[in-house]
Amino acid sequence: MNTLLTTLMIIFLLPASAWASGNSIKISAEQLAHLGITLGQPAIVKQLPILYAPATVVVPPSGEHVVSSPQAGLVNRLLAATGDPVKKGQLLAELNSSDLLTMQQQYLSANGELHLQRLAYERDKNLYAEGIIAQRRWLETSSLYHASAYAANERRQLLAIAGMTDAEINQLTKTHKLSGLLHVRAPISGVVLEVLALAGERVDSLVPLYRIADLRELWLEINIPQERMGDVELGDTVLLAKPIAENTPLEPRTAPAIMPVKAEVTQLGQHVNPENQTMLARAVITGAQKDVWPGQRVNVQVIQDHPSPAFSVPNTAIAQHEGEFYVFIRGKEDFVATRISVIGKQENETIFSGKLTGKEDIAVKGTVALKANWLGLGSSE
């Protein structure tokens, strides 16, 4: 209130050289400081805000993996917790599995049979080449050898599926030392989203132990009101609004602050959610993602390329009168109240179109005084 009274007092105490005629307010350079008027140029804008909508941050289906127990057993140790980053191949859990002992024994038996069949194969191969044995015997020996090789290879692959590495299988082959300790490793590099088992718990085969996600790419699932879906296009840019603390008062028509995270619309839904009458638009988040997490609910702003010239100025540069919006453009010795069309707001700035070039000097502060002068001396009010 004191600021407004001071401004009005300055206006009425201005010398006769400060006057308004039509949309022109005559003010000299010396009087700018008294009114607290600051000049600035409008910024040219190539993208315009289309709408605000709620969205959820999700992991793409290809980026999420469920790590399961390959065999039944007792969970001895869990080596990763929720939120931990993990590398591909990193040890996540240890299980004690009697089934693994059985599989190892079967592999060693199959590998021993393969060794015997290989000796018979090499022997009969030489005998057949020398004409000592018949072709039928050679074919039978060859068939038995290849069947043994297939069986041993199958058992080896089952051990690999159970979590044993090639080095561990080779060590088993060399030493014949059985071990029921089953190692569960990360299939990808990522972050642990959820731990689904407890140490000391007995689990069956294929029971989930962990959920791991690769967070290098995240999606936004945006709920667009069905009546606004036609305004959104593939390739539109999506900006994320910063979270607002509870009980924080917001000024009317003030857009929320934007996070340094961008996304691009890549898919538009083809059906309406019957519960809230919205349609799905999916956007892929690009660049750094340290400010967003899977499962987070955010408000987003969809912006779009604008074919015609548009400009951005601080909200303080805009004056409103009788439902119309104006900016005050500085001339040589006056300001001209110029009508504009407001087409959007973004954070603390207003985006508008009008007959400007972007090189004009505009009053960005002190517009209250200019408006009072304009309406008090240049209108019937």
Image (cartoon, grey):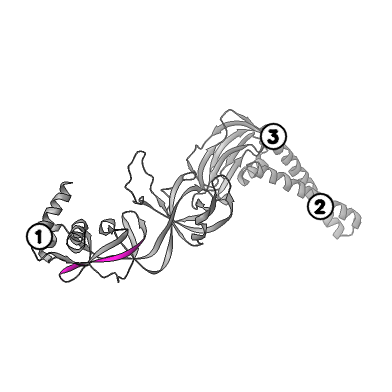
Q: Earlier in the sequence, mark 2 or mark 1?
A: 1
Q: CA distance from mark 3 to mark 2?
A: 32 Å
Q: Nearer the viewer, mark 2 or mark 1?
A: 1
- Circles 3 and 2 in contact, beta carbons < 8 Å: no
> Residue 170, labelled with which disc?
none
Of marks 3 and 1, which one's residue comes earlier in the chain? 1
Callout 2: few (<14), some (14-19), or many (20+) C-alpha neighbours within 10 Å?
A: many
Image quadrant in which you'd find residue 321: bottom left
Residue at image mark 3: 99
Residue 14 numbered tag: 1
Q: From this viewpoint, is residue 73 visible?
A: yes
Left or right of residue 4, residue 261 in this image? right
- Mark 2 falls on what kind of element? helix
Chief secondary structure of the magenta span?
A: strand
Kindly report the distance in space between the C-alpha atoms of the residues bearing marks 2 and 1.
Answer: 114 Å
In the rendered image, residue 251, in percent from the top left (x then y), is placed at 31, 47
The local crowd at label 3, few if under 14, some if 14 to 19, many if 20 or more residues have their Cα within 10 Å, is some
Residue 95 or residue 314, whichever sits in front: 314
Q: Could you tell me if residue 187 is visible in this image?
A: no
From which residue to which does the magenta span run?
332-342
Mark 3 vs mark 1, foreground winner is 1
Which residue is under mark 2?
A: 121
Type of residue at label 1? Leu
Q: Which residue sits at x=44%, y=47%?
A: 298
Q: Amino acid at mark 2?
A: Tyr
